[in-house]
Image (cartoon, rainbow, N blue to C red):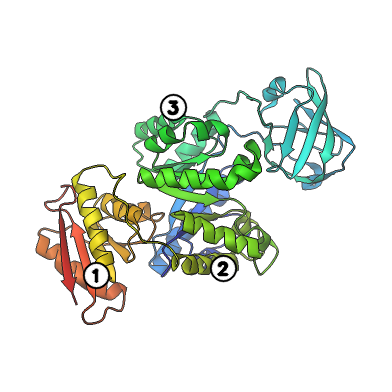
Amino acid sequence: MKKTKIICSLGPSSYDKEVIKAMVLNGMDTARINFSHAKKDDVIKVIEDIKEVRKQTNKNAALLYDTKGPEFRCGAFKDDGINLIPGKTIDIVKEEVLGDEARFSVNHPDSINYINKGDTILLENGLMKLEVVEKSDDKLTCKIIDGGFLGNKKSINVPGVNLNIPFINEADKEDILFAIDHEADFLALSFVSDAEDVLRVRELLKEHNSDALIISKIENKAAINNLKEIIEISDGVMVARGDLGVEVAMEELPFYQKEIIDEARRQGKIAIVATEMLESMKNSIRPTRAEIIDVSNAVLNGADAVMLSGETAAGKYPTLTVNCMSNICKTAEKHLKYDVDFKHLKKDFKNAISSSVVETSNILDAKLIVAATISGNTAKAISNLRSKALVLATCTSQKTARRLALSFGVYPKVTKVYDTTDEIVDDAIKNAKEFMDLKENDYVIITGAFPKNSPTNFMKIEKI
């Protein structure tokens, strides 16, 4: 069974209940709603479809909402896009217009004030490049250096320039409140620069009684510089390689990816790798060799989850792409080193028991770990230590089960609240046998807490 979790972005190619169901059955663990592109009416229908798919498949597919954040994007175009021809010029204007070959508008017109003659402007994650050759009060005139097809609402980066866009604006607040009202399990924050950005959103969630987990997207140099503090205040991080890859030297990107994953693992937080993982499968039934190696390396680097973006939102083969990624992950997991490193662990009950559980499981070559958990924290701690065995997390709520959808190697199952440790153990064995084909003399490690709401405080070894 697959241990690495898969996030799939939903869009026109996957706004269909049967497609969503097929993606779940082929390995999708979490559905991503991208507020940069999604329309609220479409999202409301998709959420109902996901609820139905959960019932049909008996799987706890989670929902991740991705904020726009202080992103800089072009506006809409006639015919949904234009061809940029190298050597020609084009104007970026403050006025809101329907773009054409002569000019286009942007979502934050005042940011034009901070861009100067000689600055480089990168479009769609660096696929196209402009140079500012003239500036006036209401527009920038740019020479097209690297051309291509520029579609609606594509990203704009201006390396080295502070565009003075607020981290959370009114539109973002509306989106976050919409997410809270529509079953947000995870909230991915775009363009986080420091811990204060995360704290602002956490306070907003608290005000509205939401316990959605916060995933901070690392996609600029400021976030790299403040990485430890950002991870400390977040529930997880995403290596958002699209924007990060144009904000830093592209040849440095693999090393930043490893650094981000390592720091997340040190702090026991979720690590996600995203962007162009199987990009060619938007139009092809097979990935490139380089993409196969990229996904495998993310797993070997220690990522909890990998993400599909345009491949499932707008690609021709969303289900096939999920299946392909799932197979790559399962193969890579066979080559993981399951060496437990306890040096970085905080000294508390949970980590003492969790490290003992994982080490015992690895020594005995246990087939399964059953973690009885109310909050999900026990299962997360075991996940972070990377046991060879899968983790069956018996939870008391659907919400907790979905919060574990991005934890490596964890399969949640909703059960009752237990009154005694004997109940925990007896039900753990029953659930273990239902979950996998256990044979005589197989070991199962059981862990949990009793009484209710205590920290993790016991471990039991059971031989089938």
Q: Looking at the image, is mark 3 or mark 2 earlier in the sequence?
A: 3
Mark 3 belongs to which amino acid?
Glu
Q: Looking at the image, is mark 1 or mark 2 earlier in the sequence?
A: 2
How far apart are labels 3 and 2 at the CA level? 39 Å
Which element is circle 1 on?
A: helix
| Crowdedness near tag 1: few (<14), some (14–19) or many (≥20) residues, C-alpha within 10 Å | some
Left or right: residue 356 versus residue 302 is left
Q: Are marks 3 and 2 in contact (CB under 8 Å)?
A: no
The residue pinned by badge 2 equals 324
* Vertical comparison of 129 with 410: above or below: above
Left or right: residue 158 versus residue 393 is right
The residue pinned by badge 3 equals 196
Which element is circle 2 on?
A: helix
Mark 2 belongs to which amino acid?
Cys
Q: Looking at the image, is mark 3 or mark 1 earlier in the sequence?
A: 3
* Residue found at the far right of this picture: 88
* Vertical comparison of 219 with 163: above or below: below
Identified at 13% across, 64% down, the residue is: 423
Percent of width and height locating residue 205: 39, 35
* Vertical comparison of 377 with 208: above or below: below
The answer to which image quadrant residue 382 occupies is bottom left
Percent of width and height locating residue 10: 56, 55
The residue pinned by badge 1 equals 364
Identified at 59% across, 65% down, the residue is: 321
Percent of width and height locating residue 158: 69, 31
Res 39 visible: no
